[in-house]
């Protein structure tokens, strides 16, 4: 067993958090958690199929980063573990749930499934089922922003792109190739690594010669920051800085969030390799509990305030299931639709 | 009318489309300062700047993926494969993302991009630089595949490919860049899904594309002298196939020979034969004959290389055999 990395300390006192913003972050994390718990239930009840990768435990990363961005303007690019990124980006829970049910009302019209969530309206560039392949796509979106600004003279083109991916993915060439190009061309992008210590059954230390991923930014002359990924304040604060940098034309940032998934790799994973001690240690750092404590201690919210949010979100998730259940299947007559732009 | 070399015809197409639409850009290795490995983008960066003629690092999979991302967000990138074979490293981005993403996204995104560059068997370039990739790519859903063969069609097809809202794989042939032809002075576009009847005839339909069009036309000269009257069709679009033109011809000649540079196994010809069987079997007087390149890595040695691809004499013999119905 390898020594656990010490999580970087973050001083909550270093951020100014308003009640409104605090509740917004809390609500988004709770939505992520409740949505995923509902997915597990629906999967076991045979309502959704295939490989379903849940995000429990990592909520602070999606919320902290995406809630630092402009909804519907900035771009978000995800992986196969994409439900919660989609939700943070504003894709309605009912359209995500309907997609998981394979319904025509799903955000990808039932053609994509869990690992292929898309929404042009919410600037969700997609869930990508193959490791690393979303990184170049995100880099291309960031290039597009620079191109509009510099070639087409569009002064409003200041959008930022965030690309999310895991620790295992940072050993793939597309990660290094895109870090190089993003730094070379000074692109407005955040590379957000969700280091949850495992790539299915491959422990991070067994897969990489330099486990501290944030350090890999330095060879590209790019800032690399290490963040406690179980602390939404820490992620939010790092993201604010990186987004501002990107928006100001100062280039990319690599953010390594140290986090953990509370469930197996996917709902099909027996999860036999991770030790009980490791799981318990990380469960104790539950990002929602941690943020709850902060909100209460700082008197930004009361228990009843949070309870009210919890029950509102639970109702929203239940409604999403109802919507998905009642939605129609895609029509067989539209099997060939969406292959080409004309269809 | 101006006499134009094929690589310059492609350059004119790109130049005209870039002047017309600021969303059009070229990305790839040495497309900017160097002007492209076959000079298709020569000096364009001076006119359009370095962001529109983007010299990328040697990272095929990633810059192709970047083009997908740029296309999804509204630009119209043209990727140049320095040699199309190098795009094997980008197979994932081409297949999964360029080809399939519109569908998996349920129509959320369009991918208007062109992936072009030199392909085919050149002169003793060795196996890796003498690839026949069209077979590998033809099964990818969502891609259009075009193969140009003359300066005239190169220009008209490339312009249409750039304006198309779908990903188009556009094959040029290394040995055709210096072909010369008089091109019209005014602008013209050619449809991406129409084959060209190069020589009309009544005895046999020869379906071909890319460089093999020229081998077929060489064979046709010999055949004419011997009194044969073959119909020669350049497919131009390898996907989708123009079955209207193909069907009209077969209903006339009832005999078909496919001449391709592609490998035999799983090639374009194999697909054509299967499709003809599906649609036009009753029209055939004889089984479709396929002249393909050999199922081997292209050898370096000149004699062996010539044996690997179809030569005009083989086409002559095939037509004679077919017409005598000795097939
Ligand atoms: C190209 C490719 N190879 C292999 C896989 C199978 N696979 C799916 S997830 C995964 C592990 C990824 O780990 P990591 O990047 O750490 O992300 P996490 O799942 O931990 O969020 C693997 C190997 C894949 N999806 N794509
Ligand atoms: Mg991981």
Image (cartoon, helix red, strand yellow):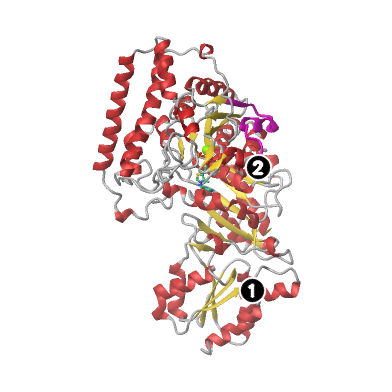
Identify the residue at image location x=31%, y=19%.
A307
Is there any visible trace of residue B52 in the rendered image?
Answer: no
Identify the residue at image location x=41%, y=14%.
A295
Which secondary structure, mark 2? strand
Q: Determine which of the numbered discs, if any, sits on residue A298 in the image.
A: none
Is disc 1 in contact with disc 2, using a CB cutoff of under 8 Å? no
Q: Nearer the viewer, residue A112 or B112?
A: A112
Q: Nearer the viewer, residue B288 or A109?
A: A109
Determine the CA span between mark 1 and mark 2. 35 Å
Residue extending farthest top: A299
Q: Position of residue B12 (x, y in %)?
A: 63, 51
**Residue behind mark 1:** B215
**Residue behind mark 2:** B53
Q: State which chain disc 2 sits on.
A: B
Q: Residues within 10 Å of mark 1 (few under 14, many from 20)?
A: some
* Magenta extent: A209-226
Q: Would residue A301 appear left or right of A187 to someone viewing this image?
A: left
The quadrant in which the N terminus of chain B is found is bottom right
Q: In this picture, is A141 found above or below B304?
A: above
Residue A224, magenta (yes or no): yes
Q: Position of residue A326 (x, y in %)?
A: 24, 42
Q: Residues within 10 Å of mark 2 (few under 14, many from 20)?
A: many
Q: Would residue B296 appear left or right of A202 to someone viewing this image?
A: right
Q: Nearer the viewer, residue A238 or B94?
A: A238
The image shows a total of numbered marks equal to: 2
Q: State which chain disc 1 sits on.
A: B
Q: Earlier in the sequence, mark 1 or mark 2?
A: 2
């Amino acid at each position: 067993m390898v020594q656990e990395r010490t999580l970087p300390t973050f001083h909550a006192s270093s951020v100014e958090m308003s009640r409104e913003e605090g509740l917004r972050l809390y609500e988004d994390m709770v939505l992520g958690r409740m949505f995923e718990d509902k997915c597990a239930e629906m999967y076991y009840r045979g309502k959704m199929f295939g490989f379903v990768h849940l995000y429990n435990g990592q909520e602070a990363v999606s919320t902290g980063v995406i809630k630092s961005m402009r909804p519907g303007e900035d771009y978000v690019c995800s992986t196969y573990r994409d439900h919660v990124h989609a939700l943070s980006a504003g894709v309605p829970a009912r359209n995500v749930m309907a997609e998981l049910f394979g319904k025509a009302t799903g955000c990808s019209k039932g053609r994509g499934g869990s690992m292929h969530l898309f929404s042009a309206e919410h600037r969700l560039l997609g869930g990508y089922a193959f490791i690393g392949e979303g990184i170049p796509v995100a880099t291309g979106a960031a290039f597009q922003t620079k191109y509009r600004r510099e070639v087409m003279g569009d002064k409003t083109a200041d959008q930022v792109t965030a690309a999310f991916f895991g620790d295992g993915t940072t050993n793939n060439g597309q990660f290094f190739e895109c870090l190089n190009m993003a730094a070379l061309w000074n692109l407005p992008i955040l590379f957000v690594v969700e280091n949850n210590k495992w790539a299915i059954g491959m422990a991070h230390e067994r897969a990489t010669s330099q486990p501290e991923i944030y350090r890999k930014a330095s060879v590209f002359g790019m800032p690399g920051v290490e963040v406690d990924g179980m602390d939404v304040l820490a992620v939010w604060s790092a993201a604010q800085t990186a987004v501002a940098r990107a928006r100001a034309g100062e280039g990319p940032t690599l953010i390594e969030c140290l986090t953990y998934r509370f469930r197996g790799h996917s709902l099909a994973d027996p999860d036999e390799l991770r030790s009980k001690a490791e799981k318990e240690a990380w469960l104790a750092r539950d990002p929602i509990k941690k943020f709850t404590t902060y909100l209460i201690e700082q008197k930004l919210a009361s228990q009843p305030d949070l309870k009210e949010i919890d029950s509102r979100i639970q109702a929203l998730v239940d409604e999403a299931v109802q919507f998905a259940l009642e939605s129609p299947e895609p029509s067989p007559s539209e099997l060939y639709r969406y292959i080409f732009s004309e269809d | 009318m101006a006499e134009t070399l094929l690589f310059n015809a492609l350059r004119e197409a790109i130049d005209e489309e870039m002047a017309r639409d600021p969303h059009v850009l070229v990305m790839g290795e040495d497309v900017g300062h160097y002007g492209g490995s076959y000079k298709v983008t020569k000096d364009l960066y001076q006119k359009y700047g370095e962001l529109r003629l983007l010299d990328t690092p040697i990272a095929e999979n990633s810059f192709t993926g970047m083009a997908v991302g740029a296309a999804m967000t509204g630009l119209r990138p043209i990727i140049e494969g320095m040699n199309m074979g190098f795009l094997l490293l980008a197979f994932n981005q081409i297949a999964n993302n360029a080809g399939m993403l519109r569908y998996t996204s349920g129509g959320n995104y369009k991918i208007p991009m062109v992936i072009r560059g030199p392909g085919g068997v050149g002169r003793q370039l060795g196996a890796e630089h003498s690839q026949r990739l069209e077979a590998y790519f033809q099964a990818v859903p969502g891609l259009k595949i075009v193969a140009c063969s003359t300066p005239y069609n190169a220009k008209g097809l490339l312009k249409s490919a750039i304006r198309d809202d779908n990903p188009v794989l556009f094959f040029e042939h290394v040995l055709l860049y210096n072909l010369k032809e008089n091109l019209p002075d005014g602008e013209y576009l050619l449809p991406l899904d129409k084959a060209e009847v190069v020589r009309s005839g009544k005895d046999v339909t020869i379906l071909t594309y890319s460089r093999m069009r020229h081998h077929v036309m060489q064979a046709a000269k010999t055949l004419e002298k011997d009194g044969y009257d073959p119909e020669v069709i350049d497919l131009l679009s390898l996907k989708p196939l123009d079955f209207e033109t193909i069907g009209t011809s077969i209903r006339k000649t009832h005999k078909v020979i496919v001449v391709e540079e592609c490998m035999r196994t799983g090639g374009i010809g194999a697909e054509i034969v299967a499709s003809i069987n599906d649609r036009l079997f009753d029209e055939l007087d004889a089984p479709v004959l396929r002249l393909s390149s050999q199922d081997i890595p292209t050898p370096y040695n000149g004699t062996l290389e010539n044996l690997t691809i179809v030569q005009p004499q083989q086409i002559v013999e095939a037509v004679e055999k077919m017409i005598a119905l000795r097939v």
